[in-house]
Image (spheres, helix red, strand yellow):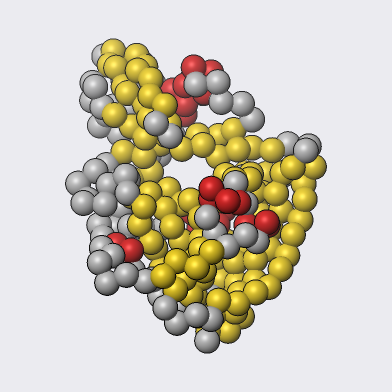
Amino acid sequence: MDIIQIFFNLGGKKCAYTCKTDELLSSVGEKLKKVLRILNSEVGFIWCSKILDQNKTLKELNIKDKTCIDVYERKQIIGAGLSINFTDLSKNIYEEQYFSEKAPDYRTVSKGINIFGICKGKKCEAYNEEVICPLKKKYFDLLKERDDLECPKCGSLIIPKTIGFFSCEYRIKGKKYENDKIVPFDFKDKSSKKDSIRYFNPDKNGNATFCELIVEIINFL
């Protein structure tokens, strides 16, 4: 049995943690939550662009001494099931981002739903940069499909931040946690400009904790 030190990164907040190689990652996660003061939440781990299986030991996962692992938080609300932090789309505050010929190829959109997120592929030129993931589908459940979102440049996992719509009619519905209550919302709208994408800026909408967030395309324009 070996003792190793791992460096964990949660949204820029970093900490070093000493643990045994025969420990389950889930056990390490529970201890780490106390260190980082994470309450009412579950945590996930990303290393080498993959989500780690928490039912395996550090040795089974081939985690070595001085490894740096990214941590993401999923909030667990009593009575609401697994939840996620995301831009508060219920406010329906948007802006038009106009297309640019100088945009890198990892910021290309398609008609319909486009997810904006941070690439976690360390070997990617877009590492820790905001990329755009065009979904090319008419239905998206953020909580169920969040771990399927990939960087268009390298195929690595992305951490979703917000959403944009291009040339379509869409519907957004969900449930968010607010003032100790679960608040539902449901609305329809459309983005029809040919030279821009309708973008929900996190700085203007703020973030919310969702226990449900579903996006549907009604029609492509």
Would you say 55 lies left or right of 120 here?
right
In the image, residue 55 sits, relative to residue 165, either above or below, namely above
Q: At 73% across and 36% down in the image, what residue appears? A: 78
Q: Quadrant of residue 133?
A: bottom left
Q: At 36% across and 39% down in the image, what residue appears? A: 46
Kindly tell me whether residue 28 is visible in this rendering. Answer: yes
Q: At 68% across and 57% down in the image, what residue appears? A: 90
In the image, farthest residue toward the bottom: 221
Image coordinates of residue 149 in percent, x first then y, are 41, 57
Quarter of the N terminus within the rendering: top left
Q: Quadrant of residue 5?
A: top left
Q: At 46% across and 52% down in the image, what residue appears? A: 160
In the image, residue 163 sits, relative to residue 202, either above or below, namely below
Image coordinates of residue 193 in percent, x first then y, are 50, 80
Image coordinates of residue 2 in percent, x first then y, are 26, 14
Would you say 74 lies left or right of 9 here?
right
Kindly tell me whether residue 137 is visible in this rendering. Answer: no
Would you say 66 lies left or right of 212 here?
left
Image coordinates of residue 91 in percent, x first then y, are 68, 56
How many marks can you see? 0
Query: In terms of depth relative to the viewer, which is nearer, 33 or 151?
Result: 151
